[in-house]
Amino acid sequence: MQKTRLTGRPLSVWYFVVLAAASVVGLYGATTYVSYYETDFIAYPCWALLALYWVGRLGDAVTRAGLPVVRQHLARWLIPPLTILALVVFLGEKGPAWVRFSLSESALRSYATQLASGAEPDDPCGWHGLYYICETEVLEGGGVLLVSSDMGLMARMGFAWIPGLAPGDTPADDALDNQYFYFTGHWWGYKGWDGL
């Protein structure tokens, strides 16, 4: 049986599968204003290990096979660092949160105004845009708290719609258990105590 030498060969398909899976977890975990802890504990270490593996394989390929062999598969060698760089920039700018919220804002606003007017929802749990809202609370001053139920361990995250509050002000119940972060327009990101 003949041994296949991996020297100078580009990264395998499995490397890209793991990179894609870590990227999906990282992007999904960053789709709320307050990121899930799972993103920090799964995606970031996985990206770091993938980057170290890439550096090691590239260094080995250049040392043993030479730069001309690496240049033959340059596109496959460049995909991982460019992907990780793009993800870091996108996550740093809160891109996933903005995209998901922008696609959902009209549905969330419609639901929030319905609740603020005193109407009872037909179903307390349901999809409003791209967020599954299962817990709501009417706040002082006519605002509404919408708690999103996603995959994270922290179940008390979501948005507060407070039309009577200026961006520099803080909601009345902003305390140890409830934290608000200004997001955009009349929207604040919300993180509360969930009993963990």
Image (cartoon, grey):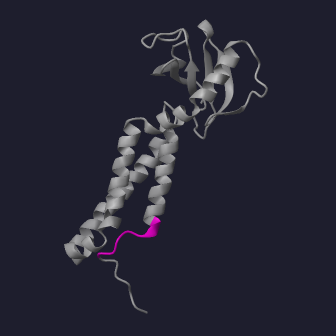
Residue at the limit of the structure toward the bottom, as seen here: 1
Q: Is residue 132 left or right of residue 42?
A: right
Q: Which quarter of the rendering shows the C terminus? A: top right
Q: Main secondary structure of the magenta part?
A: loop
Residue 128, image x, y percentages:
65, 32
| Residue 14 in the image: above or below residue 143 | below
Residue 175, image x, y percentages:
51, 13
| Residue 83 in the image: above or below residue 34 | below
Question: Is any atom of residue 195 visible in this view?
Answer: no
Residue at the limit of the structure toward the front, as seen here: 106
Q: Is residue 107 left or right of residue 55?
A: right
Front in this rendered view, residue 158 or 109: 109
Q: What number of labels is visible? A: 0
Quarter assignment of residue 79: bottom left
The segment highlighted magenta reads 8-14
Residue 148, image x, y percentages:
62, 31
Quarter assignment of residue 54: bottom left
Residue 108, image x, y percentages:
62, 26
Front in this rendered view, residue 176 or 166: 166
> What residue is rendered at 51% in x and 41% in y?
29
Front in this rendered view, residue 1 or 165: 165
> What residue is rendered at 47% in x and 59% in y?
18
Q: Which quarter of the rendering shows the N terminus? A: bottom left
| Residue 182 in the image: above or below residue 61 | above
Question: Is any atom of residue 30 visible in this view?
Answer: yes
> What residue is rendered at 75% in x and 16% in y?
119
Q: Is residue 105 magenta?
A: no
Q: Is residue 180 left or right of residue 104?
A: left
Residue at the limit of the structure toward the right, as seen here: 122
> What residue is rendered at 56% in x and 24% in y?
159
